[in-house]
Image (cartoon, rainbow, N blue to C red):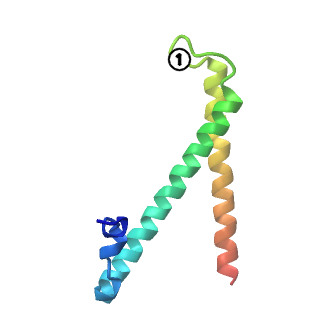
Amino acid sequence: MDSTSLSPQANLDLSKLSDADKRDLQQQVSNEMQKAKIQDSIHSLTDICWTKCMTGGISSGKLSGKEETCAQNCVERFLDANTAVLKHLEMLRGDM
């Protein structure tokens, strides 16, 4: 048995799907891509804020007040920046 017979793509024939099924599949793929982008943003946010705010070891199982405030502000600024970019892109899209 070769490796192509085990591949999921080997058994797919998209031409047999109805137009409604193709739209459904396209929507599912789009949704998964959006989820992946969101997860990537969360990972980036975590890395950026952790590097910026966590200055010492966490020996007590809790963040210091300074670290907690820093992390909260970091997340809020990250979300504010993303919101501003999205609003700008929507505005540009509306001008087209």
Position above or below: 39 against 90? above
Position above or below: 35 against 9? above
- Residue drawn at 34 percent across, 83 percent down: 14
- 24 or 10: nearer the eye? 10
- 45 or 12: nearer the eye? 12
Residue type highlighted by circle 1: Lys
Where residue 56 sits, quadrant-wise, is top right
Q: Name the residue tied to disc 1.
A: 62
Viewport quadrant of the N terminus: bottom left
Residue 54 pos. (x, y %):
65, 24
Viewport quadrant of the C terminus: bottom right
- Residue drawn at 28 percent across, 87 percent down: 16
In the rendered view, does 29 fall on the left or right side of 49?
Answer: left
User: Of helix, strand and loop, which one carries label 1?
Assistant: loop
- Residue drawn at 62 percent across, 45 percent down: 44
- 70 or 58: nearer the eye? 58
In the rendered view, does 24 fall on the left or right side of 84?
Answer: left
Where residue 6 sits, quadrant-wise, is bottom left
Position above or below: 45 against 14? above
Seen as rendered, the residue at the extreme top is 60
Disc 1 crowd rating (10 Å Cα; few below 14, some 14-19, many 20+) is few
Residue 51 pos. (x, y %):
68, 31
Seen as rendered, the residue at the extreme front is 1
